[in-house]
Structures are given as structure tokens and as C-alpha cells.
Image (spheres, helix red, strand yellow):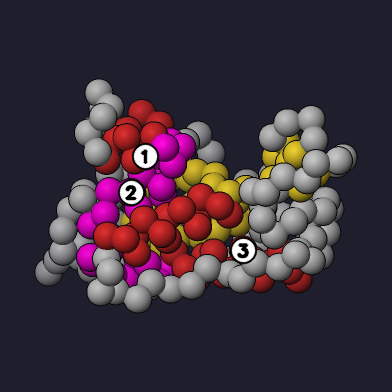
Amino acid sequence: MRLQEVTSVWVRDPQLQKEDYWHSYIDYEICVHTNSMCFTLKTSRVRRRFREFVWLRERLQNNARLIELPELPPKSPFFKLGNSQQMDERRQGLQDFLQKVLQSPFLLSDSRLHLFLQSQLSTDDIEACVSGQTKYSVTDAIRKFASSNRRFPEESEKAQVQHHSDYDSESSSSGPGHGDDSISHGCSADKGHEELKNNFSLPAPVNQS
């Protein structure tokens, strides 16, 4: 009997990153664990900021006009990283978005989604790769530019929230001048984490400093 394909995705560990002397932003770790043939890597982790999620949704929508994509968490001018409730709502909203996207076989066939989830390429480099303007293929890019040197986290692990402030645009300022901020067709995804754990051994979570 063929093993059911299962894909689980987690968004966790929001961290403050310095962009330059004046500006900073928040990024999030995206962890994927799957036994699906659609994915190049069976486990992966990358970090993405909120505006990259916005870019991904726009590109997926442009390529799937007849599909109503799930919404991203709403923006708020009063978003503060020091507010643990707001941070967890944002993180959960991003995770819900990806989980719903991965349930669509049509969206799952978009190479941009795979490069977003399993490589650290910038959005510009993702577009270049998908359009054939790079020397490496989508699969090559994922294998070369993936970040996988840490163990995989448990699903129940809560994201560690650092006490800093940040604007909802994903860019904050510490001074004047505030800034803003197909791999395979017919693939299926599933959120059945219990079935996934029965087929994969997940290592213990790693504490982030």
C-alpha cells in the first residue's frame, strides 16, 4: 500500500534583524517536513520577512487567477514586537496561510512556492531562477541555497519572542526617517502531523539564543 503523502509546515521563532544603522525588521523561521515527492528536500528551514510573504501571495495569485488565495495576517500601525499576543497572532496567521496554500495541488506546482519555502534566495533571485535567467535550475537552487544545519523543531514548540518594537510593515526605525518596509503538477499536501510523525523521527527542538 502506498504511503500517504503528508506535508507539515511551521512558522516560528520571530527575530529582530538589523537592516542598517536606522532600520530593523522581523523575520520568521519556516520549517517544512514532508514525505511528498513534490519537494526536493524532505526537511528544510529558511527565514523570511513579512513583505516576502506579501510578494509570494501576489505572485501565486497572478499565476492562479481562478483560485481564491487565503489571506495574510492584517497589517496594523500599532504592531509591537514586545506584545507577545500580537506576535503570536502574526506568527499563527503566517502559518495558517502556508498550510492552506499547501493544500492546493495547483499552487503546489508553482516553483516560486518551493524556492520560497526551501531556499534562501531573495525574491528577485527567485524570479530570475523561475524565468530561466540563472545558471542553476530550481532543484539546484534548493539544494545549493537551502539552510538545513539545524535540527527540526517539534510542532508544539512556541516561537521565542524577543522584546523589541516593530512596525507592521516589517521595518522599524531607531531614528529620523522611518522606513517601510513548477516543480511537479498534481502534487498534494496534508496537515496530518500525527501521520507524519509515524513515518519520520523528529529530533528534539533546539533552543534559540
Q: Which secondary structure, mark 1?
A: helix
- Which numbered dot is residue 175? none
Looking at numbered disc 1 in the image, what kind of residue is underneath it? Ile
- Which numbered dot is residue 112? 2
Q: CA distance from mark 2 to mark 3?
A: 21 Å
In the image, residue 39 lies in the stretch drawn in magenta: no
Looking at numbered disc 3 in the image, what kind of residue is underneath it? Arg
Q: Residues within 10 Å of mark 1 (few under 14, many from 20)?
A: many
Instruction: Decide: is 124 above or below 73.
Output: above
Looking at numbered disc 2 in the image, what kind of residue is underneath it? Arg
Instruction: Decide: is 205 above or below 139.
Output: below
Disc with the residue nearer the chain's start (1 vs 3) = 3
- Which numbered dot is residue 91? 3
The residue labelled by disc 1 is 126
- Residue 86 drawn at (x, y percent): 73, 68
- Residue 118 drawn at (x, y percent): 39, 44
Tell me: 22 left or right of 56. right
